[in-house]
Amino acid sequence: MINPEVRAVLRLQWTLTAVAVLAALVIGQGELRHPVSALIGGLAALVPAWVYARIAYRKRHVPPAVLMKAHFTAEAVKFCLTLIMFSAALLFFKDLSVAGLIGGFLAAVSGYWFGLLIRN
Protein backbone atom coordinates (compact mmCIF):
# COMPACT_ATOMS: atom_id res chain seq x y z
CA MET A 1 0.00 0.00 0.00
CA ILE A 2 1.34 3.41 -0.97
CA ASN A 3 1.19 6.07 1.72
CA PRO A 4 -0.70 9.34 1.08
CA GLU A 5 2.44 11.48 0.68
CA VAL A 6 3.81 9.23 -2.07
CA ARG A 7 0.39 9.08 -3.72
CA ALA A 8 0.29 12.90 -3.74
CA VAL A 9 3.70 13.07 -5.44
CA LEU A 10 2.61 10.52 -8.06
CA ARG A 11 -0.58 12.50 -8.68
CA LEU A 12 1.47 15.68 -9.03
CA GLN A 13 3.78 13.94 -11.50
CA TRP A 14 0.78 12.85 -13.55
CA THR A 15 -0.60 16.40 -13.51
CA LEU A 16 2.72 17.88 -14.63
CA THR A 17 2.93 15.27 -17.39
CA ALA A 18 -0.53 16.32 -18.59
CA VAL A 19 0.57 19.96 -18.56
CA ALA A 20 3.66 19.04 -20.61
CA VAL A 21 1.48 17.16 -23.11
CA LEU A 22 -0.84 20.16 -23.49
CA ALA A 23 2.12 22.52 -23.84
CA ALA A 24 3.65 20.26 -26.49
CA LEU A 25 0.35 20.21 -28.34
CA VAL A 26 0.25 24.02 -28.39
CA ILE A 27 3.94 24.47 -29.20
CA GLY A 28 3.84 21.76 -31.86
CA GLN A 29 0.86 23.52 -33.46
CA GLY A 30 -1.33 20.45 -33.40
CA GLU A 31 1.29 18.03 -34.72
CA LEU A 32 0.75 14.84 -32.70
CA ARG A 33 4.34 13.62 -32.47
CA HIS A 34 5.22 16.32 -29.93
CA PRO A 35 2.49 15.61 -27.34
CA VAL A 36 2.89 11.85 -27.81
CA SER A 37 6.61 12.24 -27.18
CA ALA A 38 5.91 14.32 -24.06
CA LEU A 39 3.49 11.65 -22.84
CA ILE A 40 6.07 8.90 -23.39
CA GLY A 41 8.67 10.99 -21.55
CA GLY A 42 6.31 11.58 -18.65
CA LEU A 43 5.45 7.90 -18.47
CA ALA A 44 9.18 7.08 -18.48
CA ALA A 45 9.34 8.93 -15.15
CA LEU A 46 5.90 8.09 -13.76
CA VAL A 47 5.86 4.31 -14.23
CA PRO A 48 9.28 3.73 -12.60
CA ALA A 49 8.28 6.04 -9.72
CA TRP A 50 5.11 4.02 -9.18
CA VAL A 51 7.08 0.76 -9.26
CA TYR A 52 9.57 2.26 -6.79
CA ALA A 53 6.74 3.11 -4.41
CA ARG A 54 5.25 -0.38 -4.70
CA ILE A 55 8.58 -2.03 -3.89
CA ALA A 56 9.92 0.39 -1.27
CA TYR A 57 6.71 0.72 0.74
CA ARG A 58 5.54 -2.89 0.52
CA LYS A 59 6.82 -3.73 3.99
CA ARG A 60 5.83 -1.72 7.02
CA HIS A 61 7.05 -1.81 10.59
CA VAL A 62 10.28 -3.65 9.80
CA PRO A 63 13.84 -3.09 11.03
CA PRO A 64 15.72 -0.21 9.39
CA ALA A 65 18.10 -2.56 7.55
CA VAL A 66 15.18 -4.29 5.83
CA LEU A 67 13.64 -0.93 4.94
CA MET A 68 16.93 0.34 3.48
CA LYS A 69 17.34 -2.83 1.44
CA ALA A 70 13.84 -2.35 0.04
CA HIS A 71 14.64 1.24 -0.95
CA PHE A 72 17.94 0.26 -2.58
CA THR A 73 16.20 -2.52 -4.51
CA ALA A 74 13.42 -0.14 -5.54
CA GLU A 75 15.94 2.45 -6.76
CA ALA A 76 17.82 -0.14 -8.82
CA VAL A 77 14.57 -1.35 -10.40
CA LYS A 78 13.49 2.25 -11.05
CA PHE A 79 16.80 3.07 -12.75
CA CYS A 80 16.70 -0.03 -14.96
CA LEU A 81 13.05 0.49 -15.85
CA THR A 82 13.73 4.12 -16.81
CA LEU A 83 16.57 3.01 -19.09
CA ILE A 84 14.40 0.32 -20.65
CA MET A 85 11.54 2.73 -21.26
CA PHE A 86 13.80 5.36 -22.84
CA SER A 87 15.51 2.72 -24.98
CA ALA A 88 12.17 1.30 -26.12
CA ALA A 89 10.90 4.78 -26.96
CA LEU A 90 13.97 5.57 -29.03
CA LEU A 91 13.95 2.17 -30.75
CA PHE A 92 10.27 1.79 -31.59
CA PHE A 93 9.11 5.35 -32.18
CA LYS A 94 11.04 6.61 -35.18
CA ASP A 95 9.18 9.93 -35.49
CA LEU A 96 9.84 10.88 -31.88
CA SER A 97 10.38 14.46 -30.80
CA VAL A 98 13.42 14.32 -28.53
CA ALA A 99 12.58 17.74 -27.08
CA GLY A 100 9.07 16.53 -26.26
CA LEU A 101 10.41 13.31 -24.74
CA ILE A 102 12.90 15.10 -22.51
CA GLY A 103 10.39 17.86 -21.71
CA GLY A 104 7.76 15.36 -20.58
CA PHE A 105 10.34 13.48 -18.53
CA LEU A 106 11.62 16.63 -16.83
CA ALA A 107 8.09 17.82 -16.13
CA ALA A 108 7.23 14.55 -14.41
CA VAL A 109 10.51 14.34 -12.49
CA SER A 110 10.03 17.89 -11.24
CA GLY A 111 7.05 16.52 -9.33
CA TYR A 112 9.51 15.20 -6.74
CA TRP A 113 10.84 18.70 -6.09
CA PHE A 114 7.47 20.41 -6.14
CA GLY A 115 6.23 17.68 -3.81
CA LEU A 116 8.77 18.87 -1.25
CA LEU A 117 7.53 22.44 -1.54
CA ILE A 118 3.82 21.71 -1.48
CA ARG A 119 2.39 20.51 1.81
CA ASN A 120 -1.09 18.95 1.88
Image (cartoon, rainbow, N blue to C red):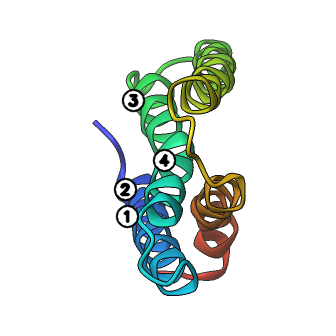
- The image quadrant where one finds the C terminus is bottom left
Find the distance from the CA under tag 4 to the CA under tag 2. 20 Å
Q: Residue at x 45, y 78 (%)?
A: 25
* Residue beneath disc 2: 7
Label 3 or label 1, whichever comes before in sequence order: 1
* Residue beneath disc 3: 54
Residue 115, percent from left and from top: 58, 70
Residue 86, percent from left and from top: 63, 32
The disc at residue 40 is 4
Q: Nearer the viewer, mark 1 or mark 4?
A: 4
Q: Which corner quadrant of the image does residue 79 belong to?
A: top right
Q: Amino acid at mark 2?
A: Arg
Q: Nearer the viewer, mark 3 or mark 1?
A: 1
Label 4 or label 2, whichever comes before in sequence order: 2
Count of all numbered marks drawn on residues in the image: 4
Q: Secondary structure at mark 4?
A: helix
Q: Secondary structure at mark 3?
A: helix
